[in-house]
């Protein structure tokens, strides 16, 4: 059971570079999320998706883009990396929606440093 | 607005001590869900427990117990006879119905250090 898989686990970028953080889940969950965790802080929602072809902004979407072409995949794109985007990024999935009491399933995170 | 506050940033205890991690939440919704997650030094997030707003029963699981009190908007977590393996950051989180696709609203986390 793979669950939620994130790649890469670590990455160092230069300011202005772009990259895509990959997230895939094999549980056929319809809801998926991207969070970022800054040092000493809780996780904050960047973007979320309630199904293939549907995405929406979270609390801190600036500087990021997402797409959801399949149920399984939910990549996060950084177009012009900035030092403020240095963080740990977590992808998560959930079978049902906001009324669910089920826990979100999290990937192991991607640690991103921008220098 | 919804908010979760974990006022204890860091706690340090000696092995076998009991420790309580506080969590206070704010929401005007009548239906909501509360969660605790553990983040060990390896960095992943491990689900510990969930509680529905309409279920105020306390819960015990081995050395872990949770005290949910709607009257004080608190969902505290107690570890009995702590062990070194309990060292981690613990997050309390809130989900409200209809809120941004069921997102979790996290507290700042409490870093627990259990020393031998």
Image (cartoon, coloured by chain):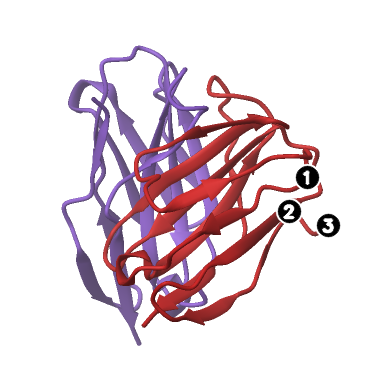
Crowding at dot 3, Cα within 10 Å, few <14 / some 14-19 / many 20+, comes out as few
Report which residue position mark 2 lands on.
A24
Where is residue B28? Give x, y as percent.
26, 16
Which sits earlier in the primary sequence, circle 3 or circle 1?
3
Crowding at dot 2, Cα within 10 Å, few <14 / some 14-19 / many 20+, comes out as many
- Which one is in front in this view, the residue at disc 3 or the one at disc 2? 2
- Where A82 falls versus B99 (above or below)? below
Q: Quadrant of residue B109?
A: bottom left
Pointers 1 and 2 within a single chain? yes
- Where A81 falls versus A107 (above or below)? below
Under circle 3, the secondary element is: loop
**Residue B101 visible in the picture:** yes
Q: Which chain, by letter, is red? A: A
Given the image, what chain letter belongs to the residue carrying mark 1? A
Q: Residue at x 54, y 19 (%)?
A: A99
Where is residue A92? Give x, y as percent.
59, 48
Report which residue position mark 3 lands on.
A1
Where is residue A93? Give x, y as percent.
64, 43
Given the image, what chain letter belongs to the residue carrying mark 2? A
Badge 1 vs badge 2, beta-carbon distance below 8 Å: yes
Q: Residue at x 43, y 81 (%)?
A: A14
Q: Residue at x 54, y 51 (%)?
A: B47
């Amino acid at each position: 059971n793979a669950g939620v898989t994130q790649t890469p686990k670590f990455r160092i970028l230069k300011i202005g570079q772009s990259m895509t953080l990959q997230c895939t889940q094999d549980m056929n969950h319809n809801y998926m999320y991207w969070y970022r965790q800054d040092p000493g802080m809780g996780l904050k929602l960047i973007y979320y998706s309630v199904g293939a072809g549907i995405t929406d902004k979270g609390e801190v979407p600036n500087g990021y883009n997402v797409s959801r072409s399949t149920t399984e995949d939910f990549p996060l794109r950084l177009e012009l990396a900035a030092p403020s985007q240095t963080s740990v990024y977590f992808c998560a999935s959930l079978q049902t929606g906001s009324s669910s009491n089920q826990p979100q399933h999290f990937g192991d995170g991607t640690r991103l440093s921008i220098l | 607005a919804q908010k979760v506050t974990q006022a204890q940033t860091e706690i340090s205890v000696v092995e076998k001590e009991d420790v309580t991690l506080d969590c206070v939440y704010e929401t005007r919704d009548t239906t909501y869900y509360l969660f605790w997650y553990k983040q060990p030094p390896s960095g992943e997030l491990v689900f510990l427990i969930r509680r529905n707003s309409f279920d105020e029963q306390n819960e015990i699981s081995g050395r872990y117990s949770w005290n949910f009190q709607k009257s004080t908007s608190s969902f505290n977590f107690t570890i009995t006879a702590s062990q070194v393996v309990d060292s981690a950051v613990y997050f309390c989180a809130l989900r409200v119905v209809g809120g941004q696709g069921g997102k979790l609203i996290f507290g700042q986390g409490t870093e627990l250090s259990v020393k031998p």
